Image: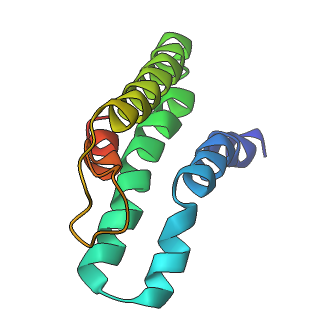
Amino acid sequence: MSGARGTIAPRLPAVGLLVLMGGAAERDALAGDAVETSGEVLRAAIPAAAFALTFRNGDREGRRQFYASFAANTLATLALKELVDEERPDGSGSDAFPSGHASMAFQ
């Protein structure tokens, strides 16, 4: 019985992280294009899978490193968006660079 429990527990934090990081994917899935939707899902799923593996492997140090790199990536991306005045291709704002999607891919 403990074996079944051990396989579920490591997934719970990853599921929560996936929901937090990929909330826009559900909204975008209703809006349209399959390529765009898959990009939204993958931008959250890949880091979430890496995060989940830290639990599966009992890697506390890896989890700490994930938290630190996630925070640094987010802060750097948001700071650069404020500093660089680059208009979006559709003209909807001036926070096009750097791409949050691209920075998440390097997470």
Give percent across and percent down for residue 22.
Answer: 52, 59
Above or below residue 20? Residue 103 is above
Give percent across and percent down for residue 27.
Answer: 54, 78
Is residue 10 or residue 33 the one in the foreground? 33
Extreme right residue here? 1
Q: What residue is shown at x 66% (from left), y 49% (from top)?
A: 16
Q: What residue is shown at x 68% (from left), y 39% (from top)?
A: 6
Residue 56 lies left or right of residue 95; in this view the side is right
Extreme top residue here? 61
Give percent across and percent down for residue 104.
Answer: 34, 43
Q: What residue is shown at x 62% (from left), y 51% (from top)?
A: 20
Above or below residue 102? Residue 54 is above
For the C terminus, the quadrant is top left
Q: What residue is shown at x 26% (from left), y 61% (from top)?
A: 88
Q: Could you say which quadrant of the image residue 42 lies in?
A: bottom left
Above or below residue 59? Residue 90 is below
